[in-house]
Image (tube, rainbow, N blue to C red):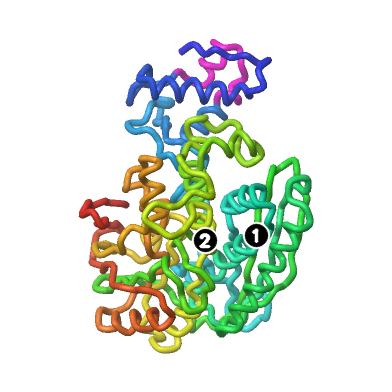
Amino acid sequence: MKLTVDSTLPIPVFQQIIDQVHFAVNAGELKPGDRLPSIRGLAADNDIAANTVAKAFRQLEFRGIISARDRSGFVVCEATASRYQSRGVSADKNEVHQVVDNLDAGVIPGAFCKITEDFLGGDPEKCNVIHADGAGTKSIIGYLQYKETGNPEVFKGIAQDSIVMNLDDLLCVGVSNRILISNTINRNALNCPGEVVSALIEGSEQFLAQLRDHGVNIYSGGGETADVGDLTGTLVVDSCAVAIMKKADVIRNDITAELAIVGLSSTGQATYETQTNSGMGSNGLTSARHDMLCHYYAEKYPETFDPNLPRDLTYCGPYRLEDSLPDSNMLVGDAILSPTRSYAPVIYKALAELGSEIKGLIHCSGGAQTKCLKFGNQVHFVKDNLFPTPPLFAAIQQASGTGWQEMYKVFNMGHRMEIYVSPARVNEVIDIARSFGIDAQQIGYTAHADSNHLTLTDPLGNRHAYT
């Protein structure tokens, strides 16, 4: 194929290649199964470096537009990529797992987090758990709210998001003793002045104090604020948590057949929360931001997105932050920025009362409702009694036209924590959750299978299969 490449344009050459190939596929000029010219041939025909073409093809492959075939070069995929993937985000992070899965799995393979020997204390009966995560692109929505209102208090919720994404993963291996957490703020100081940093630090300290009031022994170990204006136009808020625990207390996620799956709702207001929660959490915010918010934000705040993104995927929604969310009492901005709920008080009580009866805990974060596929062996996960779709996720689906199959891979869709127990213990788990004002129900069960797979029935009765 002949490309039109102009090195004098501000758009990088590799991006010009991406745009032209992607457009050719969308327009039907390149059809599923069509073979693309070789990298070397395309480079020679268009007088460009082979590495430039290879870089473009890698990005197209990541988007799911083309795929590599043995001895056949690249061909056009049968279906175009998901909206999430087209924005440079991976819902299931398969390319990451392909690398990580070949590394040392730790002393307890299969646990939700990697478990190592007690390198910090040297106790052979104990182990270390360390975890890093953050608020993701939710911080950019916080930035938009801050710029529109001038109120930095919104970043206190972002601080909570970053902490919870670590804490609730640690819960899934049974951590219930002292936890030390450190925060990292990477910011563009021109756009995020001192009052933003102050709000983040104050928000972290206040949230940690609230958790301690509810029996969660989590403490600040300090952190770092880095001014990286050439890397980000706004800010990135991350955290790292570490704990020491007894190996005997680790939840091994030995998920087998004949277990009940109890889901803990991500919406409503828990007894330890100060406001109603939309259920947003801190996953899927790239899609939520662009699919819900209108192009006004692209025009006014170009520092908040990658200029290489296709225009039809950039702030292409119908709403502004101050608009009302359909079928809800919340505003769109408040719903998207709803601080990520921690289930720590619930899980602590469940561990105290049920102990080893809890066979598995899964935080439905990256991969959302398909996260379970990473755990257990030869398990058919059946989710056939899900919570009603929360208004925010229904609005995202309607605004974007995203298929339900993808929605359940990107968003928690109503519950963000799963507890795996025998059917006889289901009511106990539900009662514990409801004692904290959190709705819970058996959302499914496990059965034997030749390999892990998931069958999910959405509230509309549609069935979705995942492997």
**Residue 439, above or below 135:** below
- Tell me the residue at 54%/22% (across/down): 17
Place of residue 325 in the rendered image (x, y in percent of width and height, measured from the top left):
43, 52
Q: In the drawing, what numbered circle is on residue 231? A: none
The residue singled out by tag 2 in the image is 338
Instruction: Report the amino acid beneath label 1.
Output: Phe
Q: Using residue 345 as the reference point, say whether residue 443 is left or right of it.
A: left
Q: Using residue 94 as the reference point, say whether residue 260 is left or right of it.
A: left
**Residue 390, above or below 173:** above
Q: Which residues are magenta?
A: 37-53
**Residue 5, above or below 147:** above
Place of residue 80 in the rendered image (x, y in percent of width and height, measured from the top left):
38, 33
Whether residue 150 is visible, yes or no, is yes
The residue singled out by tag 1 in the image is 155
* Circle 1/circle 2 CB separation < 8 Å: no
- Tell me the residue at 52%/13% (across/down): 3
